[in-house]
Image: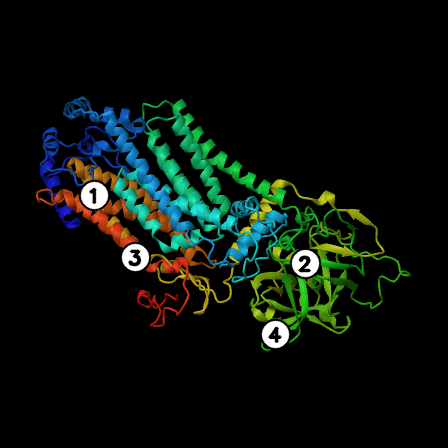
């Protein structure tokens, strides 16, 4: 079919173009720019993804032949170029000046008015469209809400996001690597549905028992169900074709992967909802470009900004849809700038409107979600240790909240020492030794993110064993430049370093706990220095930024931020670095401070401002994202695995007696998407070259080519934006990260196959059954997709019984790849 289309385009290009003066048979570029397709404003040549190409004219006689039926439209309604919605406001005036009076007159003469359809016919057509949308929406909701209560236990990441919903209900502060909007919405759904926030969400497989979990699952299923009508309307707007939109809806409705993600307490359906809503809003706003500053134009532009804030507020990968909308906006502004009929004042209005709706409004909403987040979570919780001491002072129940502690550090004080690098934690030790072959077999010293008694240290003089807390002895303050010992309170071993290599970081020295009851050797001595202070100055709790210099080796105490193996309880490595450059990883501050001989001061003055809280929380989230590690017995994946549906993900159950749910895309849909990506690149390249070379296309072919290049180009760009950045990420990746890109590839597949089937029917117009080609093709794709869903639906709705490796299993014949572990 593509070869036949290529030969047709080449033949028409050769026969229709006037001869070049130099004898090459092609019109000069200036002539080709003046070609004009009747019924449309001229569009200047543009880039491939934006889909802006010059439209050559079709002679009036040829168009009349097409109308009389020598080349009838494909079954199901053809898409002539005149049926597309042009952006007149962008190009009309400039194109008219470029085309000239003769071309404009010819176009106006050739254009014949259409007989308006009777009102009853238009009402019937509108009712049919609404009925089809209602059917698509109903089917989506039925498939997503079917067996929503099964299984009645925690599945996969419900243990995280359900627990975080509980934290919001209980107003308990926690840390997560994602922005807060998605978890806030889950918590709100649970609260409104009667969930009281008392379920612990400890691990996958725990039964919900009497706790109300259906509200949170139902909320996620509702947003997951809305993906299908949003995709349907997006493709309908891009293609003006009901069959293309219906194909897209079928691919997403009958995909077992999208179905599975939509039925559980997860962030993915919330994220994908905002992505699809932003895409639809952008496409609708583009369609209003010929009516700038009208009410619909403002509505869709503002709604685009709101949805962008929602996408970014759920996960940072929402940045990808922001980049796509940003590319579309820059392209719009660039072409507006080229319209010489627009005054600079009008251009300024266009620029201001986009800044307000696509930058200021999303940013304000994004900041507002954090304001609500910090206002609601005002109680101390498991996330305290990820943040600075000043941040923790604002949390009710934290030992620093409204606390009064001694201001200056003194000998004999019991302290905690916190690293200033985000998400590193407190200097920590415990009664476990380094294993054989890892430096000296002495007590481990690490950093730990949570509050713990093993974080406590006693600060002592390096050359005295007397008790500084003896009431008969005067208070002696620690000063900048003093030589000290740090004795671990729980084990009575001193902070120690030597020339043995650190466990993970080469060329750094090992740090251990050494000695008995505070007695050790000279490798326990450290010089305490305050950043930007003079020798002899006292050291202030919380506010002084200190470094600990090892007296024997000259190295600096710090944390590499690397996660130790299981023998180190997956805490972070502490080293002594010989590189003396000041970095956050080697700078500490004293947080907790207990000394009964010293007066206390209030810490209220140290609470940070809202901008400081925002900045710190983002730094912690980014660092946490980069440090994510896979959970036990969990399959990670690589980006190249995803489009080929190489490997799924267990949501629930392992054994044949368990209720098993397996996240895997419908292989028929996913492999058709993969084939369609290749077919689209090939077919779009053929049309792009033909149009760029000035080929004169029949009306149907010209209209379909614009749908393919413009609408398909937007969808291809969306797929690329949501897929290729994962190749650059260093964090652990999972199969579910591909699903936003899968939405775009499914929309592209629906648009592509509708277009190719129309082209095929048009090319076979001389055969009696040509009109059935398009209809039969669409029906075959719909029925094939539905049947594949019938085969694979147990993956989403749950399986019990023999595993697929067992020949007795009803799923045995469906394990098409060895890597599918269901």
Secondary structure under tag 4 reads loop
Horizontal side of 629 relative to 418 (left or right) equals left
Instruction: Name the foreground residue: 430 vs 501.
Output: 430
Q: Which residue is disc 3 drawn over?
A: 788
Under circle 3, the secondary element is helix
The colour mode here is rainbow
Q: Mark 2 = which residue?
A: 451
Q: Nearer the viewer, mark 3 or mark 1?
A: 3
Q: Quadrant of residue 587?
A: bottom right
Residue name at image x 56 percent, y 63 percent: 562
Dot 3 crowding, Cα within 10 Å, few <14, some 14–19, many 20+: some
Q: Examine the rendering and report whether any part of residue 78 can be seen.
A: yes
Q: What element carries label 2?
A: loop
Q: Name the residue under label 1.
A: 687
Q: Position of residue 281 (x, y in %)?
A: 39, 36
Pair 3/4: label in front: 3
Q: Residue 516 carries which label?
A: none
Distance between mark 3 and mark 4 Cα atoms: 58 Å
> Mark 4 highlights which residue?
439
- How far apart marks 1 and 2 lie (CA) works out to 64 Å
Marks 4 and 2 close (CB-CB < 8 Å): no
Q: Specify which label sits upstream in the sequence, 4 or 2.
A: 4
Q: How crowded is mark 4: few (under 14 residues within 10 Å), some or many (20 or more)?
A: some
- N-terminal of the pair, mark 3 or mark 2, is 2
Q: Residue furthest front?
A: 210
**Location of residue 423 in the rendering, given as x and y in whole percent from the top left corner:** 60, 55
Mark 3 / mark 1, whichever is N-terminal: 1
How far is mark 3 from mark 1, CA to CA? 33 Å
Q: Can residue 583 be seen in this view?
A: no
């Amino acid at each position: 079919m593509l070869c036949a289309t290529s030969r047709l385009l080449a033949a028409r290009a050769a026969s229709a173009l006037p001869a070049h003066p130099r004898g090459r048979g092609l019109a000069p570029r200036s002539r080709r720019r003046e070609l004009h397709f009747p019924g449309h404003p001229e569009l200047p040549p543009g880039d491939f993804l934006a889909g802006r190409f010059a439209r050559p004219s079709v002679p009036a006689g040829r168009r009349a032949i097409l109308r009389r039926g020598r080349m009838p439209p494909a079954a199901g309604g053809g898409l002539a170029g005149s049926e597309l919605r042009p952006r007149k406001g962008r190009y009309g005036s400039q194109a008219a000046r470029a085309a000239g009076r003769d071309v404009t007159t010819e176009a106006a003469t050739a254009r014949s008015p259409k007989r308006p359809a009777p009102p009853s016919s238009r009402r019937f057509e509108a009712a049919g469209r609404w009925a089809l949308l209602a059917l698509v929406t109903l089917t989506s909701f039925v498939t997503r809400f079917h067996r929503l209560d099964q299984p009645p236990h925690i599945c996969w990441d419900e243990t995280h996001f359900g627990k975080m919903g509980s934290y919001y209900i209980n107003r308990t502060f926690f840390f997560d690597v994602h922005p807060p909007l998605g978890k806030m919405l889950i918590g709100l759904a649970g609260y409104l549905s009667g969930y009281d926030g008392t379920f612990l969400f400890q691990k996958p497989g725990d039964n919900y028992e009497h706790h109300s979990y259906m509200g949170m699952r139902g909320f996620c299923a509702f947003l997951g169900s809305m993906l299908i009508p949003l995709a349907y309307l997006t493709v309908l707007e891009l293609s003006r074709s009901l069959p293309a939109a219906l194909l897209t809806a079928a691919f997403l409705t009958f995909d077992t992967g999208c179905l599975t993600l939509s039925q559980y307490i997860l962030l993915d359906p919330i994220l994908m909802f905002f992505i699809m809503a932003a895409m639809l809003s952008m496409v609708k706003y583009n369609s209003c470009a010929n009516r700038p500053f009208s009410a619909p134009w403002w509505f869709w532009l503002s709604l685009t900004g709101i949805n962008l804030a929602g996408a970014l507020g759920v996960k940072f990968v929402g940045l990808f849809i922001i980049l796509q909308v940003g590319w579309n906006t820059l392209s719009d502004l660039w072409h507006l700038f080229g319209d010489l009929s627009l005054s600079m004042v009008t251009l300024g209005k266009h620029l201001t409107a986009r800044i307000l709706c696509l930058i200021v409004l999303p940013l304000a909403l994004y900041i507002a979600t954090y304001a609500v987040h910090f206002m609601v979570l005002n109680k101390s919780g498991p996330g305290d240790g990820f943040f600075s001491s000043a941040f923790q002072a604002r949390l009710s129940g934290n030992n620093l909240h409204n606390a009064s502690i001694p201001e200056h550090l003194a000998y004999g004080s019991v302290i905690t020492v916190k690293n200033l690098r985000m998400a590193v934690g407190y200097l920590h030790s415990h009664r476990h030794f380094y294993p054989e072959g890892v430096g000296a077999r002495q007590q481990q010293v690490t950093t730990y993110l949570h509050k713990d008694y093993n974080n406590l240290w006693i600060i002592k003089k390096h050359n005295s064993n007397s008790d500084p807390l003896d009431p008969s002895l005067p208070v002696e303050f620690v000063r900048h430049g003093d030589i000290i010992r740090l004795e671990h309170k729980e084990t009575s071993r001193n902070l120690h370093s030597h020339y043995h290599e650190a466990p993970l970081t080469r060329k750094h020295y090992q740090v251990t706990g050494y000695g008995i009851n505070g007695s050790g050797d000279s490798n326990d001595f450290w010089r305490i220095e305050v950043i930007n202070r003079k020798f002899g100055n006292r050291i202030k709790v919380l506010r002084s930024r200190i470094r600990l210099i090892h007296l024997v080796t000259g190295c600096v105490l710090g944390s590499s931020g690397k996660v130790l193996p299981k023998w180190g309880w997956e805490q972070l490595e502490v080293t002594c670095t010989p590189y003396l450059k000041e970095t956050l990883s080697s700078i500490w501050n004293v947080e907790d401070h207990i000394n009964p001989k010293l007066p206390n001061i209030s810490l209220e003055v140290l609470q940070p401002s809202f901008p400081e809280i925002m900045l710190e929380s983002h730094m912690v989230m980014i660092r946490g994202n980069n440090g994510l590690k896979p959970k036990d017995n969990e399959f990670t994946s690589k980006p190249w695995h995803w489009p080929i549906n190489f490997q799924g993900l267990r949501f629930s159950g392992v054994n044949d007696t368990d209720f098993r749910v397996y996240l895997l895309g419908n292989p028929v849909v996913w492999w058709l998407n993969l084939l369609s990506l290749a077919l689209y690149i090939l077919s779009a390249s053929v049309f792009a070259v033909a149009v760029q070379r000035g080929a004169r296309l029949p009306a149907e072919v010209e209209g379909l080519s614009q749908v393919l290049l413009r609408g398909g180009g937007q969808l291809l760009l969306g797929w690329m934006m949501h897929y290729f950045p994962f190749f650059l990420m260093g964090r652990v990746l999972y199969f579910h990260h591909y699903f936003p890109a899968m939405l775009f590839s499914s929309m592209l597949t629906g648009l592509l196959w509708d277009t190719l089937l129309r082209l095929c029917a048009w090319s076979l117009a001389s055969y009696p059954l040509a009109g059935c080609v398009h209809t039969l093709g669409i029906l075959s794709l719909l029925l094939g997709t539905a049947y594949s869903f019938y085969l694979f639906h147990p993956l989403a709705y749950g399986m019990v019984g023999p595993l697929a490796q067992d020949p007795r299993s009803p799923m045995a014949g469906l394990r098409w790849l060895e890597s599918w572990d269901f």
